[in-house]
Amino acid sequence: MHPLIVVQVSDIHVHPDKPESLVMHSVVRDTVTRLQPALVVFSGDISADGHVVPDMLSKVKKLLDGWGLPWVAVPGNHDVGNRAGIGKHEVTPAFLKHWIDVIGDDRFAKKLGCWLLLGLDTQVMGSGLPSEKHQLDFLDAQLQTADRENLHVAVFQHMPAYLNDPREHVVGKSAYWVPTGPVRDALVKRLHHPRVKLVASGHVHWHANFEQDSQRRIWCPASCDLIVDDSHFPRGGGCTGFMKYTLTDNAIEPTLIKLPLKAQTVSLVVD
Ligand SMILES: [Fe+2]
């Protein structure tokens, strides 16, 4: 196949009524559009609490449509909420419905050449909502498709499945960053499918690029002016930017594109 470019933008947190947020959005849009990607994947937190601010999600959608590029998105905690006890708002059927009505489904499957790109909604994991189970069924069905059609798989999601080790169970404040419990273990098991070559996430406002169990793991940094540090994170990932992926027949090559945003760095924030 001809090499294809896919861009991952995470945690852009657009606030359509704040001029400084619109300026940042323009910087990201202009940098991404210069690359002319075949697809832009927004891995969550496209908005600044669009589930509770009236009309915010529809205004953000209009801005993202204005990039003139094909795009897909999965929600983050600032778009639909989070599992109970984590962060400000608990994800509810109404918040999810709002996302689906305005943006589209909260997960996706997209074929590009010999690649199958999957988007998962980590916000429902641990919520007890029906879509938690439906999503695992969806993932199983997509992995079967990949087997049948001989496709490589790249997975995009808001939260990383784990921080440092697939067997870890993060407790305390840092549990904010990852799903927990049986559904997290069910996800990790599926992500170890041999067709999965890349698992790319956002949420942590920190960059990492490492290999685990023969898979590439990418933490896409935030495309806004906030860097978050946590002692559990691998060192050296403090930047703002987004990820560019070059897809070929047998490889997916990640490149970090840094953004010239005036960012502040804070230690673990949980809101
Ligand atoms: Fe987030």
Image: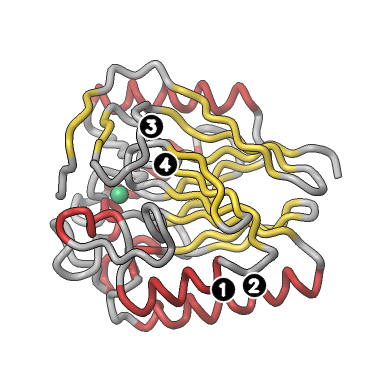
Label 2 neighbour load within 10 Å: few <14, some 14-19, many 20+: some
State which quadrant residue 160 falls in. bottom left
- Say which of marks 4 and 3 sits in front: 3
Amino acid type of the residue tagged 2 in the rendering:
Gln
Q: Which numbered disc, 4 or 3, marks the residue that appears first in the sequence? A: 4
* Residue drawn at 76 percent across, 72 percent down: 147
Q: Is 193 positioned to the left or the right of 1 in the image?
A: left
Q: Which numbered disc, 1 or 3, marks the residue that appears first in the sequence? A: 1
Residue behind mark 1: 139
State which quadrant residue 75 falls in. bottom left
Asked if the residues shown at circle 3 and circle 2 are in contact, with their CB atoms under 8 angstroms apart, the answer is no
C-alpha distance separating marks 2 and 1: 5 Å
Residue behind mark 4: 10
Amino acid type of the residue tagged 4 in the rendering:
Ser
Q: Which numbered disc, 2 or 4, marks the residue that appears first in the sequence? A: 4
Residue behind mark 2: 142
In the rendered view, tell whether residue 216 sits above or below residue 261. Answer: below
Asked if the residues shown at circle 1 and circle 3 are in contact, with their CB atoms under 8 angstroms apart, the answer is no
C-alpha distance separating marks 1 and 3: 29 Å
C-alpha distance separating marks 1 and 4: 21 Å
C-alpha distance separating marks 3 and 2: 32 Å
Point out residue 219 in the picture as x, y percentages from the top left corner: 44, 43
